[in-house]
Amino acid sequence: MTNFDYDLFVIGAGSGGLAASKRAASYGAKVAIAEGDLVGGTCVIRGCVPKKLMVYASQFSNLYQNAVGYGWEKAEPNFDWNKLVEAVQKEVMRLNQIHINNLEKAGVELINGMATFVDPHTLEVGDRKITADKILIAVGGKPTKPDIEGIEHSITSNEMFHLSEFPKRFAVWGGGYIGVEFASIMNGLGAQVTEIIRRDYILHGFDQDIVQNIQDGMTKHGIQFKTQTTLEKIEKTDDGLKLIFAGEKHEPITVDTLLCATGRKPNLSRLNLENAGVEVLLGAIAVSPDSCTNQSHIYAVGDCTDRINLTPVAIAEGRAFADTVFGHIPRHINHTGIPTAVFSQPEASTVGLTEEEARDKVGDNLTIYRAKFRPMFYSLTDAEEKVMIKLIVDKTTDRILGVHIVGKDAAEIVQGLAIAVNMGATKKDFDATIGIHPSTAEEFVTLR
């Protein structure tokens, strides 16, 4: 029988890798995890956590204005970008240390450095060669940039948290989560923001009511959209970055900073997967439902598999892997019915099917419940904020197929409703539930 250095070796100390390594160690496995960056992965270092902190920061400008309607004296706030950047990075480093401490408490050895495959059971980290019985790849993803002239003058989400100066003129290229959220953040902090998208609307794949209501809300907040276009060239000038658009629909504009948010891909380039014989399809590690690759002892979770690229999904996949392989409790993650949120302004959240997906599934045998109203928070203010809520119901079974909301506290509301949707709740179940009054959430159980 072969003697290995570790029962499990994890490549990447992000959300999935951390969850898997600690869970495996709790079953008595000898575990090591390798990371060439800060511990915590994209989410903690340059993703969900620092971004959400910036979302909070960007909301204060409106809170100052809204306070006047509640009797507070008008304030003239002064925003300090460098103070925010410093505070965010301090929190990132605090979380990095917490994750390191938690690994130590769990009995997981942290190895600093990028691990690469030498053969199916051997990895190299620096000048050290390591063998493992089981290997988990959890290296996440990385942003990509289109190949156009001048693209080197743009930044990605990786650099957004380290800008030395606040860009008064800010452009975002891309209409996905990252582009929409950073457009809203920078607008809230006081920048003049332009968002460039190929289609008419942002957030391709979301329910159309969500898409339209977010984009309308962002436009009312002052964000300008350049639709049905893409960038052809970027020129660096004395006045800033000159953005030249494809076609003749839009005139060039000049900005201080351009965020390229046109996509991400699995971060596989340095792994030497060919040495382990691991199959890659369409740029991602190919896995079975239980996260196993074509090599029976090598697994992969999270964004590097390009299934559903969300932090809680990576965590769930990592724990399911550890339960299956080391806890002998076979299970895998159901990738349907996963709730998600877009921390734009206005915020949005959803679980279940879009209306288009529901019609593809059951035809026109649907009932759509929809309401749009001014939330109570804004009733004493001049703000023209609205909430849109929507339920998609299968007429035959009365089952709720989709829940969608745009507006204040959307994510907090949908998190609870996701439990009901995934348990098979019906419209009658919603109708039989007493609402919390006065609240936005109660509208979901009073729709008629």
Image: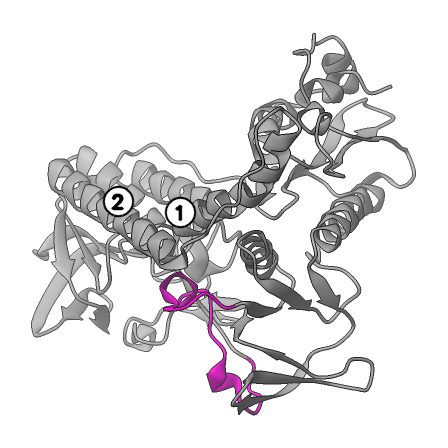
At mark 1, the secondary structure is: helix
Q: Earlier in the sequence, mark 1 or mark 2?
A: 1
Numbered range of the magenta stretch = 146-167
Query: Could one spot residue 370 in this view of the protein?
Result: yes
Q: Main secondary structure of the magenta part?
A: loop
The chosen color scheme is one colour
Q: Is residue 163 magenta?
A: yes
Residue drawn at the location 52% of the way across and 78% of the way down: 145
Left or right, residue 317 beside residue 374: left
Residue drawn at the location 76% of the way across and 83% of the way down: 251
Q: Is mark 1 in CB contact (under 8 Å) with mark 2?
A: yes
Q: How many other residues sit within 10 Å of disc 1, few (<14), some (14-19) or many (≥20)?
A: some
Residue 25 position in % (x across, y down):
18, 39
Residue 171 position in % (x across, y down):
60, 70
Identify the disc placed on residue 137: none
* Image quarter of residue 426: top right
| Type of amino acid at the residue the image marks with label 2 | Leu
Left or right, residue 313 beside residue 82: right
Query: Could one spot residue 299 in this view of the protein?
Result: no
Residue that carries the numbered disc 1 in the rendered image = 49
Residue 168 position in % (x across, y down):
54, 67
Q: Nearer the viewer, residue 367 or 197?
A: 197
* Image quarter of residue 267: bottom left
- Could you tell me which quadrant the N terminus lies in? bottom left
Residue 37 position in % (x across, y down):
24, 63
| Type of amino acid at the residue the image marks with label 1 | Val
Residue 307 against residue 165 in the figure, above or below: above
Residue drawn at the location 71% of the way across and 23% of the way down: 376
| Disc 1 to disc 2, C-alpha distance | 10 Å
Residue that carries the numbered disc 2 in the rendered image = 95
